Amino acid sequence: MLGARPWWLLLAAAATGCFFPDEGLEAPLDRIYFPTGLALSPAGTRLYVASSDFDLQFTGGSLLALDLDRVHRLVPRSCEQDAGCAGDERCDLEPTAENGGAPSRWCVKRDGSDAGRPCGALGEQSAGERILHPGRCRAVDLARPAGGGGSLVAGGVGIGAFASDVIYRSRPAAGDGSERPGGRLFIPVRGDATLTFIDVDDDSKSDSTGFELECGQSGAGNRCDDDHRRGDDPAEENTRGQRLPPEPYGVDATGDGTAIVVTHQTEGAASLFVSDWGQNGELGSGPRLEFVLGGLPSRPVAVVAVPPSASRGAEPTYEPTFLVTSRSSAEVRLLSYFDDAAASPARPFLADRGGVAITANALGFDSRGIAVDTSGRRRAEAACAGEPEGDAREACLDEAANVALGVFVANRAPSSLLAGQTRPGSDLPRAFDAQPLSFGPSRVVVGEIIDRDGSPAVRVFVVCFDSRAIYVWDPVAREIEAVIETGRGPQPLVVDPRRGLGYVAHFTDSYVGVIDLDRRHPSYATIVLSVARPTPPRSSK
Amino acid sequence: MKARDRLGAAARLGALWLVGLAACSETPITLPLRSLERSGDVAFVCTGAEGAGRSVDGCPGSDPDGTERRLLALVTQTRRGEVAVVDVTAGSVVDVDRSTPGFSFVPVGAQPRDLVATPGGVATFVGVAESGKEGIVAIPSTCARGVAPDLLDLPACALPSAPGAMTILIDGEVAGLARERCDAPREAAASEPGRAVAASGRRCPADLALESSPAGRRKLVVALPELSELAVFDAQEILDREPGTYSPCVPERVIALDVALPPTPIAQRLPPDLAELPACVGSSPSFGPAPAVYLPRPSDLALQGDTLYVSDLDAPVVHLLEASSPCELAELPPLLPMALDQPTRVVTTSRVAVSPLTSTGRRFAYAVDAFDGSTMVFDVTAGSSERTPVVRPGAARLPFEPADRIAFSSRAHDLDFALRDVPIADPVTGLAVVGARCDPDPALDSASPGARYRTALDFTTGAAPRKLRGVFGFLALANGQVAVIDVEDFDAPCRRPISLNPAAEPDYRGCAGDPASPAFYTDDGTDEGRRTVSGEVSCGVVQPHRARTSAFAVSSDTTGVRAPALRNFPRLVDALGGALAVDREDDEPEPPQLLGVDFSGGEPAEVYVGTSRYQRGGQNDLVIDPGLAERASVTLSFIEPRSYAPEEEITVAYEGQITGTRTTGLVRADGSFPDDARYCDLGVQDEGVVRGLGEELGVAADRLGAFAERHADYVQLTGALPDPEQTYWREGVGYDCAGAPGQGHNACTEVFGTADEPTPARDLRVVEAYRDRLVVAPRGLSGDEAARRLALVECCFPARAAYTIRAGHQWVVRGSASGFRHDIAEAPCVDGACSLRCTRSCEPRRKLQRARAFEISSSACAIPSDPSVAPECAIGPADAAVDAACVVDGTGPIDPASPCVFENLTLRFAVYRGTRPSERDMAFSFVVTGGFAPLTASVAGSSASVLPESMVFVPQLGQLAVVDGSSAGLSFISLTSVTASRLYF
């Protein structure tokens, strides 16, 4: 039944393609649709994909959990000889009819219908298809992947439209130091100006939560409930009467997920959520909007939490800091989080600690993504383990705290990667250098590849949305090591150092590309698998 | 069709025609198509007919048969994996394959890095760094244009790791004999053309034996950064490889670079004005533990004569190699980059360049600090034992850059040198001598070359900022500017004031050590004569290894304001912005006065206001007597024009703010005030610092304590009290603040006022200042009363509150560009223990970084018994109870040598108390303009979106070639006009 609405109204609605608020298609939970956020579970068994429903074809977006163990089994494996492959496989080193005269240097089946075929049951893309969707093999169907086993989607929930990103934080240890199961995803949703949170399992812990995704989901679209959308109820969340401003965009949180900062891309503001992780076995009440900091340079976009040094983070007076970039202003800004524990009641807030001008390139404004590299400091801290406990180790850690952090910013004026360092005793970066890139740098990710000797090596990845490329920058050599050709609209990227893989979600064609990040492989810095069938936007058809 | 219909159709057609006409008549928009994108590096080759190589010095020119030679620029395209060819002679980008839409370039493989051409133009070698396919690709000039080469047409070889910088060295002939390999015997045939495999039978032949100058075998030296090595390859051997193959390159020599640091650190040699520096050991920040072992990572190569300079990205050395023979490269003791201001930082280098010899036989190497993009100067003159960066004199007056660095706001991406002259021929001999210096001596014959280089009276000819005669350095900055650095300016003797100062001590113009005569550099030796120099305000206009100025430092009707000058005389406003002025006609109390002071050398005070020069007792009289002056003034120093920002507004405010408003102040009843604000960097002066100031000012010992309390900085709480609805006031500690149960908020408001109407109770003086905290006490209170007040502050402001810090009864000088300059630093650590206390720095470079002035009051000014009557005094009355310093007993201008005269890098003045008390936020303001602007050329002609990646001086053109990593392609900077002359994109 269509209900009591007048028939002419329904006809008009159908003619214009409009939907009544309580009608319309729910976001599908078996496909990716304009993805804008990726997050990796701690042990790398789950890839969380936030889809934005950018063209509003559905009533909202979605958050899917993909089974990466199964995805990984579909990734071609590089080889140098047959001994590097399984018993029923050989190394594809010679031109054959099956490989089209172009050896893949992957392990291929010896026998069967897919014998000798580099892409196996997936089949190979044509030359024209590879131009749009780089990668030798055809895409893996999410719902019916090659090799069977059912959908690669381990779980999915519906969220609001226009999600802009997603981050993962593990549940911190209990007061007695014992591990608590699970973690949490935080997703800024521009459509309804909220921060959605979803409790998830943590595959790195011995205890399981027993669920895949938990956000009070229900209904046909398995939608998250209102209680898991925060920032829209001042009375419940804060004593300042503040509501989350519009256009939440960038998000990051302290390592323990206690303080979460969200930027607002059309305002000069950043918002602070403080997360309640609950006691004992409870999930906790989740994040509360506590403070909105205004007066920032217009159009802040990306935000990154600055990890503290081992010595500083242990101090009771430690104040977590965040770095924020801006589209309109040629600077990077430093924010500090204050828990206000001395006050009664405590009202946490953010303070603007000033900024540093970007003079590393001609114009300096229009900064987008930002990321921090702590590897140098962590190495110095690790070296202190050899010092005897007590003053000697403390002094060693204090010295290690002076090792600069690398700060990397994707900038568009002109298109460049800005590489800087923090100063001793300060989290403000300085001394930016600029590496030219092609058009459209958007996100920056610091991650580890597997180097030629099999050891991990830090690289900075810059996703260039407009030019369909991801630059791989070596911070030691200060050179671009490789350029990963991607499909259309690459946006979020995560790096899985354990497997030597990267995952990039393609916003335009709604699929995920799997990138080989093992320098020992000839396919290094190329897309070796596409997950989910590329779907061009409706308007382009 | 009916008539009506025909008419309608015609009308519609007519309307359509009109619309079409309007559209067609619009001016078409021409979009420049960009062919070069993400360019990296450039090499130049000269070619003749059929692409045959020619000596690069032969371009521009013609072959004997009249064929015009082409100067080609090969530019790496890092995104496309190609090398673009720009025909500089024809002025166009070359499309090597016209059958393909768009511009096609020479494919070389992904991630091309450096490229280098042989001196005879036969071939260019490109290093490619694609992961797994690292190698060297050779581009014979026969295939550089019009041939559409494929990657398989080019000889190449594989390297074990990514190549870095490259250069060509010549294994010269000995007794006319060359050798094909380092280990082969020398024979005459080795240099015979036609013997090489690639000499013929190739689509792209290349025979390096055709290059005759310089004679000898061409060796390609390639840096392998990941392997910490330099590898030497025979260039012809690479060219002889079968195109389409990619077997490993075979090095003839491999030099494993060493990091030979001295066993004990070598200190930089300091100029006399910094001689005190070692004794003043500040607590410089630590940059973390230094590596135990350094692995070299060569980043750049520069060849000068028989020495190869190699910058290093991972080790604190610039390697030097003896390179007279590429087969016997040997490391020499390296240069040692370091940072005077950050001695614990490991300094590495990204680029290096070496200058030509100066006219005095000196040579310098410039190296870019990889950390911040500043440039170090090394003296590499033959016989010099200096291995550390040069510390330039005069650093105390140059706060904008370190003493041992050339620094700009944007970092240097590349650098090079040029020796250039525009010699004037001797009218008698007809000879033009390169390097003839300008001579300002009025006794010299005006027709002699030395005199003919002088600046003309109308500034149109002769020595000038844009006339480059000498040796100059050039820095390609990341912001798209190319900055010019003076190394040796042949015209420097003529760029100065007309006044001479024979004394060893510089005068206020920075002149010193001049000849005893003449008295003035004018034709008649008087200050009224026609000048024989440029007449600039300072002797410091041209200084070696400093940025060159872009304009004459002269303020005149001809040049406009180009020297430091005021835009207007200072104006005084009260706290609300209302104007205040001295008016001796009325009986009202007079406000304080800001007045210039004579120079310490006895010269009368002077200042330019616009292009008008005001001088005490001069034609435009600068009145500095507080009893006579009717307008405020200051004097500006001309010792170092680089001390000045191009333009800035200066405010001198009574009890002005040291900091902006901070929101995280937290007061405790014990006086502690923790906030990680880096107070020493902010310049906070606590009572201890002020005591020291008082001693310098001659304050009596028994009055120092009171002096310190009065003049220490103070915290002003500016934020609001917690909201009265908060539970804190109903149930928390705030319930009975001030002992008033239930009235805590009201009691606090009564004492502290509101954020809009604060009371003085919010002012807390700084007893002690540390990096991360303060110890405060209520201003004007002591003992139990102070303790009670602090407890009340803690009660009324329980959470972090907004605050600012102000100077105590002092005038604060702040510039819109220079900010608040101060000499406060953290106290040095002692035996590893660091107090973090703020103290005055003993650094000689910070002596003139001052931003506070004490008011001068007069003990001769009697305060009338009738408080309604204003005292009639030139200088306001001193209060014997509180004024312990800067009290004069006269009415005239203060002694120029008095410590109460404010002097910093640029300003010199005295503040005289008025008969009207000074109030907080009263402020003098004025604009100083005509500051230093460096000479730069911009490559951002066609686009503001530029990012220069590399630069090289092309002596054949007399221009700099700048390669842009963004979209500006290849630009040429003319050294005649110091502007961009040609753009290829």
Image (cartoon, coloured by chain):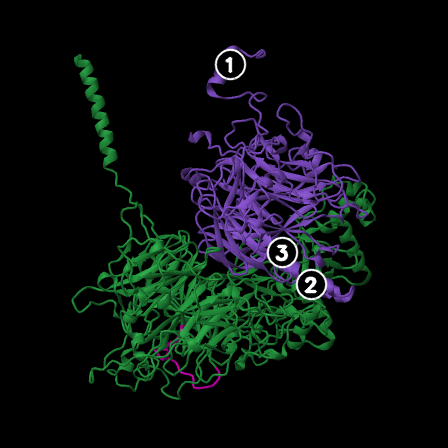
Chain colours: A purple, B green
The residue that appears at 27% across and 79% down in the rendered structure is B452
Tag 2: amino acid: Ala
The location of residue A473, given as percent across then percent down, is 51, 54
Q: Label 3 neighbourhood size at 10 Å, few (<14), some (14-19), many (20+)?
A: some
Q: Are marks 2 and 3 on the same chain?
A: yes
Which numbered disc, 3 or 1, marks the residue closer to the eye?
3
Helix, strand or loop for disc 1:
helix
Q: Is residue A152 above or below residue B91?
A: above
A164 horizontally vs A41: left or right: left
> Which of the numbered marks, if any, corresponds to residue A9?
1
Residue reaching furthest to the bottom: B516
Q: Is residue B148 magenta?
A: no
Gap in Å between the C-alphas at discs 1 and 2? 72 Å
Residues at discs 1 and 2 both on one chain: yes
Q: Are marks 1 and 2 in contact (CB under 8 Å)?
A: no
Q: Of the numbered discs in the image, which one, if any, rests on residue A383?
A: 2
Task: Report the chain holding disc 3.
Answer: A
Report the amino acid beneath label 3: Thr
Say which mark, if any, is on residue A374. Answer: 3
Q: Which residues are magenta?
A: B486-505
From the image, give the main secondary structure of the stretch colored magenta. loop
